[in-house]
Amino acid sequence: MWGTGHFQPLVPFLDQVRRSGGQTLAVGPPSLEDAARRAGHPYLAGGEPPQRTDAAPGDRKRLGHLAALALLEVMERAVRDWRPDVIMREPYEYASAAVAARLGVPVAQVAIGLAGDIWESIDRAAPALDAFRAGLAGELRGSPFLTRMPASLDASPFPVTRRYRVPAAAPRGALPAWWAGRAPLVYVSFGTVVSGKAAAGEVYRALIDAVRGLDARVLLTVGRGFDTSQLSDVPANVHVEAWVDQADVLDEAVLVVCHSGSGTVYGALAAGVPLVVMPMFGDHFANAKAVATAGVGLQVLTGQDAQGRPRLVSGDDTPRIRQAIEAVLADGSYRQAAQAVSAEMAAAPTIGTLLGQLSGRR
């Protein structure tokens, strides 16, 4: 596991095992130990992998190899000593896959993004994987692939694909009366990724300007790492918070505006809420394309910087963001499509059922 976003999709599985009377152990880099312990699960830390989220595909293959080496020793010790019934791994962590294959332990991969992207990542990493063990890349392609994304949004090339649903947290109550009136609620969030970047203020300003005067209540969350005092001249229809429980927001929202991170996209569609997405890096682009193709929202592409890299949202994008927001709010087909996807997701089996199938128990 190489980041909090890679760890969180595993937590519902760990929680279910504990509820069923089983034992859990998470293994990963030191940087994730606090997150695991906050989630209530024991943790065994190995080495810290290289941190290069902007690496080119060829570099990512090399870095994936180095990351596996950072965990390989502690992973092998844990599996030999602990003898788990099954290893649940996130797809970009390879040490557990190498150890599982060698020691004959069943392994399943829990998706953190779209299946096609993960399939391609195995292709890129194949030389490094097969250096651990001949045929390992092929074994990964054949191992169970567990995803919370529905087939209508995410066709999977993995021959053993199992879809599941994560029960939504129950809302704790209505949002505070931050606005006058009861206009429709638009939720704007870029997760925790953007808040730590130098240009975060410009990103949030562009979004604020895009919804200025919109006939809607707009909630903008910026993450706890951003100083909200940097945002001046916030219009009356916009309220800025560091963090708000997503279940409370999605219970009222008619539209989610976000960076197309997998977690936010999943949460919005599980609630039947359409999206306007602005991809900026990583798997955002594949997620945004899937949103647009499925008709559950619109994507706004920001273009490239002087180095040819996708750039963050800026004031230049404000008019197109406003246009996309107004289009989705005005056209009920986006909400209808999102609600259809929500129903499809709700029909998927629970994690408990899925774990029973993996272990041979019903």
Image (cartoon, rainbow, N blue to C red):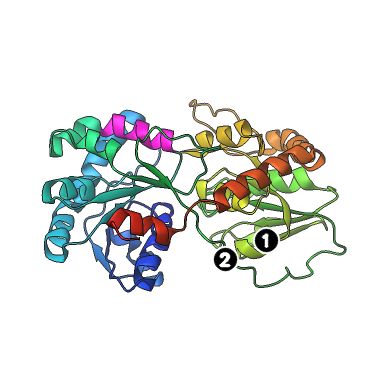
Task: Give percent across and percent down for residue 93.
Answer: 29, 47
- Amino acid under label 2? Ala
Q: Can residue 233 be spotted in the picture?
A: no
- Identify the element where label 1 is drawn: helix
Task: Give percent across and percent down for residue 274.
Answer: 68, 45
Task: Give percent across and percent down for residue 157.
Answer: 39, 32
- Amino acid under label 1? Val
Quadrant location of the C terminus in the rendered image? bottom left
Bounds of the magenta segment: 115-125
Given residues 194 and 144, the one toward you in this image is 144
The local crowd at label 1, few if under 14, some if 14 to 19, many if 20 or more residues have their Cα within 10 Å, is many
Q: What secondary structure prevails in the magenta region?
A: helix
- Lower sequence index among marks 1 and 2: 2
Identify the image quadrant of residue 290: top right
215 shown above or below 132:
below
Pointer 2: what residue? 169
Pointer 1 with pointer 2, Cβ within 8 A: no
Residue 249, disc: 1
Farthest front residue in view: 362
